[in-house]
Amino acid sequence: MEVNLTSGKATIVRVKGRDKAIGGSGLCAMLFEQRGFTNRPWDHADQPLIFAIGPLTGYFPLMSKTVCAFKSPYHDQYTESHAGGRSAISLRFSGLDAIVIKGRAKRPSLLVVGSRTVEIIDAHFLWGMDVIRSGRIIRHMVDRSHGHRSILRIGPAGENLSAMACINADTYRHFGRLGAGAVMGSKNLKAIAILGDSSLPLPKDQKPYRAVWKKVFQDVQKSGMMHKYHNLGTPANLMRLNELKSLPWRNLQATFDEEAERISGEAFANDHLLRNLACSGCPVGCIHVGFIREKFMEDHRYYYLQMAYDYEPIFAVGSMLGMKEPVSVLKLIEKTDRMGLDVISAGVALAWATEALERAVISTKETICKLSFGDVHCYLEAVEHLAKGKNNFYRLLGQGTMTAAEEYGGQDFACVLGQEMAGYATGELFFTAQSLGFRHSHLDTAAYSYEQKHGEKDLEKAIDFLLSDELPRCLLNSMVACLFSRKVYTKERLKECLSSLGYEELAENLDDLARHIRASRWRLRFQTGFDPENVSIPRRFFKVRSWKGPVDPDYLNRLKKAYGEELKKIALSKSD
């Protein structure tokens, strides 16, 4: 479905190319090539905002993600952000593989999409509201298709065009990194409601489909592969990384802290875990919803705040800000979510601002409040300043930590690897992979895992790993699978799944398709301005010490150069 917010019209379009693009990441790249503009800025009204799912969505467990593609306000280059929740299953039950949104609404609006519905509703009264409050109102405004309805919305950060603005998906999931929320804000689009109001046809020959589905379900439920994600979840990583001296503390001034156990996965589970939730179409339940109890001072009544927590938010507004109390970490996660900010970027940016204040690079004139590691009250205030662009300093910081550092100083200790770093200070390979990765994300690569198993400095072997690791991820991101399921959905299993639904041609050409999709994505990235030589790694990363010892500057520089050269070759390759 193509929706033009300027004209208020929508069109259903059948697009050829399933045999090349598959869906998800591949489909987004194809649609941007056809409908996007590499030479126009990210906020041009004609630039598309694309949401896409894959051929296995709704048919198999953990095929539960949606890919959002856009030109990023962070660096004005083509990129993606992925989210779970209900959006994927809602699109499938709307009879759509993708929604392409162009134009700019005359006033803040709510877009409602279903199999028989397209509405653009005046929502000016929601502008300025936080994500939680606006979500409650939208659920009453669009009181249809319960269970298959997905609500995507932005907060003040997106309205103010912050490059750190995310799109909240069904309260507990997010299209988080590289500023998708600002793209919605630039289009005067406060929210999107996807109804999922149709049915999903099963294959004509159900016997092979049922047999493969059962195999997948047994792998997910009975093999033990997914137990980690349901039990403690990704917060289980925290103590392991701390023991390896690879957990960033206080703006990466340290990689270990003796009191890390206070914010461990066990600490959150024991005292603050309310319940587990799952994305639609997933039997695992990896979403850990925490709670804290607060008292109203006026009448002494108590109320509960709920928020989802994972390892990355605990790192970003926990260890990175010197927090050692789970309640403080949860308060910051909840506040950041309300404001519609990507929690990783927001936490890392405020960590830099705190050290910059300590070093007198900036003053309280810029930060307004006196930022101090471990002080939750100042950070709660700063999160709101960051989302709303309270002054020139916060407006610049909202465009990226390095943008503010270039104006005020402090580039050397800005923890930026393409964008604000993820929480894995494992060493040279991860720093290289995140700096030059397609999304500058820890989910682009398993480099942080590779480094925990390989201490040798073998440049050729390391680069081969990065290149080979990316191909299966391209397939999974085009299906679109949760990456937690990558051990379940091997290439052979994907072939079985596709064949059972009648996609025999796709099943027989997975290797070629993976290479084609990877090349398509990187070609767009380079065409919109990406150049590995222009991506620098700040000096702070060269001073990191992990369990392997200090970072080797020569090895890091050689890795970055070699990987950048390989990416150029991929972008120039004839993928067809």
Image: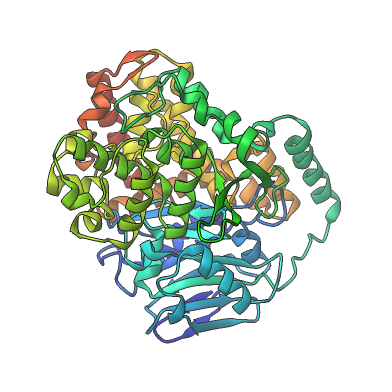
Whether residue 499 is visible, yes or no, is yes
**Measuring 24% from the left and 53% from the top, which residue is drawn there?**
529
Quadrant housing residue 112:
bottom right
**Measuring 41% from the left and 74% from the top, which residue is drawn there?**
127
Q: Is residue 527 left or right of residue 248?
A: left
Residue 331 at x, y = what percent? 48, 47
Whether residue 47 is visible, yes or no, is no
Q: Nearer the viewer, residue 329 or 541?
A: 329
Question: Is residue 336 shown above or below 361?
Answer: below
Residue farthest to the right, as pictured: 207
Q: Is residue 554 left or right of residue 81?
A: left
Question: Is residue 557 shown above or below 434?
Answer: above
Figure disc tally: 0
Residue 130 at x, y = what percent? 45, 65
**Image quarter in which the N terminus is found:** bottom right
The scheme the figure's colours follow is rainbow
Residue 473 at x, y = what percent? 52, 41
Residue farthest to the front, as pictured: 299
Residue 408 at x, y = what percent? 13, 46
